[in-house]
Image (cartoon, rainbow, N blue to C red):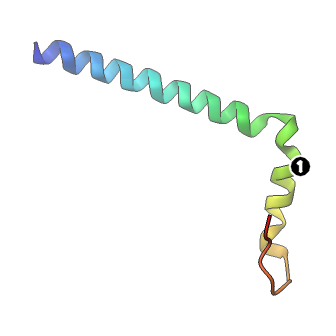
Amino acid sequence: MYETLSSFAQTGGLLLFVLAFVLVLIYALNPRNQKNFDKAKQIPLNDEDEPDVR
């Protein structure tokens, strides 16, 4: 019984991890998000004293 549940949990966990990884890749590489990522990469170079409030 323990071996069956352990095997199911390991396989299910792996499948969930792979699915989450693929979804994150799709989000990160989606061209619609390019503007947000370009804006975020400029934050360290921003010399303003005020924080960027959205």
Residue shown at the point (87%, 36%) measured from the top left: 31
Which quadrant of the structure image shows residue 9? top left
Placement of the N terminus among the 4 image quadrants: top left
Residue 30 vertical placement versus 7 (above, below) = below
Q: Where is residue 18 in the image (x, y as percent from the top left)?
A: 51, 26
Secondary structure of the residue carrying numbered label 1: helix
The amino acid at mark 1 is Lys
Q: Position of residue 23 (x, y in %)?
A: 63, 29
Counting every numbered tag in the picture gives 1
Residue shown at the point (61%, 28%) measured from the top left: 22
Residue 48 vertical placement versus 15 (above, below) = below
Residue 29 vertical placement versus 38 (above, below) = above
- Give the side of residue 24 with respect to residue 39, left or right: left
Residue lying furthest left in this view?
1
Q: How crowded is mark 1: few (under 14 residues within 10 Å), some or many (20 or more)?
A: few
Residue shown at the point (57%, 32%) measured from the top left: 21
Placement of the C terminus among the 4 image quadrants: bottom right
Q: Position of residue 14 (x, y in %)?
A: 41, 24
Q: Where is residue 3 in the image (x, y as percent from the top left)?
A: 14, 16
Residue lying furthest front in this view?
54
Residue shown at the point (86%, 55%) measured from the top left: 38
Residue on which the image places disc 1: 35
